[in-house]
Image (cartoon, coloured by chain):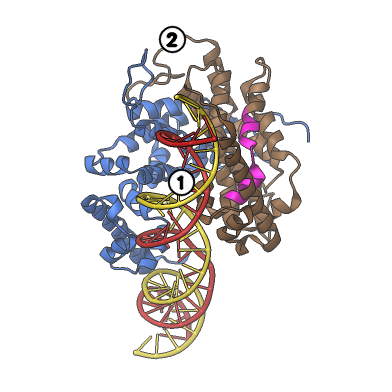
Chain colours: A brown, B blue, C yellow, D red
Amino acid sequence: MTTRRPGLREEKKQATQVALREAALRLALEHGPANVRVDDIAEAAGVSPRTYNNYFSSREQAIVAAVTAEREHRVAAAVAAWPAHVRLADALTATIVEQYTEPRDRDELLLITASPALRDSYLDAAATIEHPLATAIDQRLGGTGTFTSRVLATSVAAAVRVALQQWLQPPPAPLATSGLLLLSGSLPDLLRSALATLAPALDAAEEQARRPTSRQVRGAADGQEMTGF
Amino acid sequence: MTTRRPGLREEKKQATQVALREAALRLALEHGPANVRVDDIAEAAGVSPRTYNNYFSSREQAIVAAVTAEREHRVAAAVAAWPAHVRLADALTATIVEQYTEPRDRDELLLITASPALRDSYLDAAATIEHPLATAIDQRLGGTGTFTSRVLATSVAAAVRVALQQWLQPPPAPLATSGLLLLSGSLPDLLRSALATLAPALDAAEEQARRPTSRQVRGAADGQEMTGF
DNA sequence: CTCGAATATTGCGTGCACGCAAATTTGCGT
DNA sequence: ACGCAAATTTGCGTGCACGCAATATTCGAG
C-alpha cells in the first residue's frame, strides 16, 4: 500500500522531462539562449507550453537541468559509497570535486557562463544536492540527527555555490592591481578550499555521532554549551 | 572621484523604497496577500508600476522586506561590535538569536506563515545577510581571507535558513509517534543548534587567522593540504 | 542661473509563470 | 474486456518581470 507500483506512468513522465531538457539545451546551443522561447522548447519536445511549466518553473531551468542532470543523485550515491572509516569531510570533498570536474562539454559551459540568467540558474541548481546529500550524510552519521545533517548538507551546498560563483566570475579586465588579487583559481582548488573551511564542522559532527552520549534532545544542545546570554 | 557625494538623490530613493514596502505590507494585511496586485502597491506608494520592479523583483519581496527591513545591516553591525576576545561563533550566535527573536508583530508573522509564496520569499530573504555578514566576518578574521569569509557567511546564512524552515514547518497533525520527533522547537533553540553545528568551522577559521602563517595564496590552500592536480 | 552629464522614472511591448477547471490518459479491480 | 478512479495534460486567463528607449529629475561646474 505504501509503495504503489511505479509502472509505465512514471516512465513516461521521466521521458517527457528528458525530452524537454534536451530540447531546451539543443535549441539554446543552436540559436542562442535569448532566442529560445518556452513555446519553442515545448513544441520541440512534443508537449503543450503549459506542460513545460509542470516540469520546470523557469525557462532557464530546463537548459541548466540538461547539463547538471542527475548530478544530485550521483553525489549522494558516491558519498554513501565511501568506506565507513574515511572521514566524512574527505568523502564529501573527493566526491564533489570529482562530480563537478567531470568531462564537461566546452560549448555547454560557454553557453551557461555567457548568459547572466543562465549563470544564476546554474548557481541555484547547486542547491539541488541539498536533499539527497542530507540523506546521505544522515546515513553516515548514524541516522539520528536529521536536523544536523540538514544543516551540514545545506552548508556544503552553499560552499559549493560560493566556489562556483568565484569560478564563474568574469576576471576583471585590467588585473593590473598590486599583488595577485587571489584571482579566480581552478575549480577543483576552489571547491577544496571552500570545503576545507567546513571540514572542522563535519569532523565534529562525525565525532559526535561516533560517541552518542545522550540520544534525546539531540539538536538542541549539540556540541556546545549554550548558556543564556 | 571614487566616492561621489550621496546627497539628496540617495535619500529620495531610500524614501521610495520605504514607501513601497510599507504600502505593500499595509495592503497585504488589509486585504490578504492574494488580493494585492503590484499595481496597487505602486499606486499606494505614488510611483508607476514599472518603478516597483526597479526596487523589488517580485511581488512578495516588498512585503517581506517590510518585515525584515535593515536586519542585514543590524546583524553585521552587531557582529562587528562584539569585543575581539569573544569567540566568533559566540558572537554570531548571540547576535543572530537576538536579531531573529526581537519583538515581532503577531499579525505580520501570521501573514507570512500563512501564504506559501510569502514563506518562500521570507526564507530567501535570509540570504540577504550574506554580504554584510561576510564583510563583518572578514573584518574579525583580519581582513585577509575574503574567500573563506564568504564561505562562512554563506554557510551561516544557510544554517539560519534551515532553522527558520524547520520552525515554520506546519507541525503534522497526528504527532502521535513514539518519542519526541525533535519537533519544531523554539526558534532560538533551533538557531542555536544550527549554528552550533557550524561552530567548529568558525573556531578553526578564527584560529587560522590568529596564527597567520603565510599571507599569500590565502584561499587556495586554507586549512588543508591539497595535493594532486 | 544655466547648462550638461549622470541618474531615476515611466510607458510600452513581450514573454513568462501559474491557478483553475475541463479533457485526456493510465492502471487496477472485477 | 470494461469501467471507474487517480493522475496527467491541456487551454485559458490573469498578473507579473523586465529589456528598451524616451522622458524627467538631480546635481555640480562654470
Q: Which image quadrant is residue A9 in?
A: top right
Measured as percent of width and height from the top left, residue A113 is found at 65, 54
**Residue C11 position within the rendered picture, expressed as x and y whole percent measured from the top left:** 38, 76
Farthest residue, direction right: B229
* Residue nearest the observer in this picture, B160 or A229: B160
Q: Which numbered tag is attached to residue B132?
A: 1
Please tell me which residue lies in front, B181 or B98: B181
Instruction: Residue B220: tell me if it is visible.
Output: no
Is residue A210 shown in magenta? no
Q: Secondary structure at mark 2?
A: loop
Of the pair B147 and A137, the residue shown nearer to us: A137
- The magenta stretch is A62-76
User: For the residue marked with disc 2, what is the amino acid?
Assistant: Ser
Total numbered badges shown on the rendered structure:
2
Q: Quadrant of residue B144?
A: top right
Closer to us: mark 1 or mark 2?
2
Q: Are marks 1 and 2 in contact (CB under 8 Å)?
A: no
Image height of A121 relative to A91, above or below: below
* Chain ID at mark 1: B
Instruction: Check disc 1 and give the amino acid type.
Output: Pro
The residue lying toward the viewer, choosing from D22 and A227, is D22
Q: Residue at x 62, y 51 (%)?
A: A63
Residue A143 on image: x %, y %: 52, 17
Label 1 sits on a secondary structure element that is: helix
Q: Residue A4 shows which numbered tag?
A: none
Q: Which mark is residue A214?
A: 2
Q: Is residue A227 left or right of residue A11?
A: left
